[in-house]
Amino acid sequence: MGFLRSVSLRVLEAAVAFLVIVSIPHLPPPMSFTAFSVTPSLPLDGPLALNDKLNNAEHLFEGELKGPEAVVSYNGHLYTGVHGGHILKIEDGELVRVGKFGKDCDGIWEEKLCGRPLGMKFDKGGNLYVADAYYGIFRLNVRTGAAENLISINETIEGRAPKIPNSLDIGRDGEIYWSDSSSEVSLEDGVYALLGDGSGRLFRYDPQTKQSKVLIDQLQFANGVVLSPEEDFVLVAETARSRIHRYYLKGPKQGTNDIFIDGLPGLPDNLKSDGEGGFFVPLVAARDAMQPVVSQILGPYPIVRKFLARLMAMIEMPFHYVNRIYPNYYTKRAAHWIGHFESISMLTPKRVSVLQLDVNGKVKTSFHCLDGSLTGISDVEVFEGAFYFGSPYTAYLGRVKFESPVRKNSMNMKV
């Protein structure tokens, strides 16, 4: 009887704590929680059938960089943005710093100070456009290091300021299409954005008026952006829902949007043209019927998501408070880690996948890594006979070479 009574009391205490945490008004994080459901993952057969094309990936510059989120090429060189806020150029086998938008900092636990480059894109004139999660959208001259802040993180756009500028693409007319993953929390607290309702948005920036217009709203972690070859539509990844949206820029559906593809077998990150009229879609975390994403399982249960988000925020708050009074390495690291994607990166399945879609959103083929030599890839760049892989987590730049200079849609990978 004593044991049962003890268990009953613990259950009652947990229930009371649960009700208190979800009922107190104005507790962080500042977001709403309503029920949602996610389309089940497409089966891993046909063009999605598992293979080992990305196994045995090389690790370049291991230990010399951290989190090469995006990878782009221009004029015979690769560029990436890393933790610490730097834009790096790979030249003659060396990493060369060419730009930075944030301030000097002691380490990645001061990400808000350092800056965090995410999406990157060159225009036809060789200017590099970068979305920095903490400072906004920049245009960088990679030859001189001169940078111009085109869109500030403090700029209110149709009633809300962006909190996580994430990805972008540039039209032939110079207009910038860009995503903001959340207007409620910063990247440092990105996990909260997976638990709450979507506040991400897709924008179009007019370089003449210097104004941004919202094209799609209420996306749950808006991410990768890419224009179609004819620039008649633009795509944006909705990472937390494993789907991609399409916004029509021309034609009879101009000004409307729909779902380009749903039920992706993972969480889509940066989107990129494949150079053949279609698109590459790297999945930063895998999912399937046997390995679902926890935040998606909890979609129909908003009260549970609210409890988890508030509990994490309550655990995080004391570290912020102590650090304000007595700044130190340990509380800074703890406050940074709680709520950051780094804290859940080890929970993702081992499989790594890149999909290749046609212009209508159909899967043409897929590439998989099953041996753990790649982790959490967020971007892919085809350059000089190889795939180069970006990742927000790794301390290396991944590479898998092609066996021969073949067409991308039939890539025979060297394994």
Image (cartoon, helix red, strand yellow):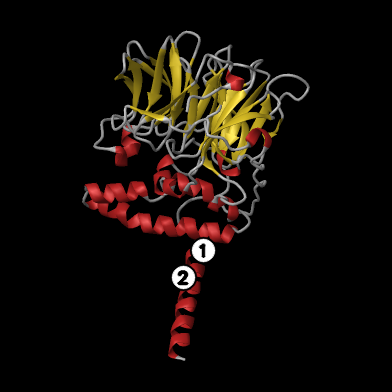
Q: Is residue 354 above or below residue 327?
A: above
Estimate the x, y position of residue 6 in percent, counting from the top left: 43, 84
Viewer-nearest residue: 14 or 326: 14
- How far is mark 1 from mark 2, CA to CA? 9 Å
Left or right for 38, reference 342: right
**Residue located beneath label 1 in the image:** 22
Residue 204 visible, this orientation? no
Q: Is residue 41 above or below residue 88?
A: below
Left or right for 311, reference 319: right
Estimate the x, y position of residue 340 in percent, counting from the top left: 41, 46
Q: Dot 1 lies on which element?
A: helix
Estimate the x, y position of residue 371 in percent, counting from the top left: 46, 39
- The kind of residue tagged 2 is Ala
Which residue is rendered at x = 67% and y = 24% of the image?
Answer: 358
Residue 247 visible, this orientation? yes
Viewer-nearest residue: 59 or 228: 59
Which residue is rendered at x = 58% and y = 12% of the image?
Answer: 172
Estimate the x, y position of residue 306 in percent, counting from the top left: 52, 58
Q: Dot 2 lies on which element?
A: helix
Q: How many marks?
A: 2
Residue 143 falls in image quadrant:
top left
Residue 10 falls in image quadrant:
bottom left
Q: Which mark is residue 17?
A: 2
- The kind of residue tagged 1 is Val
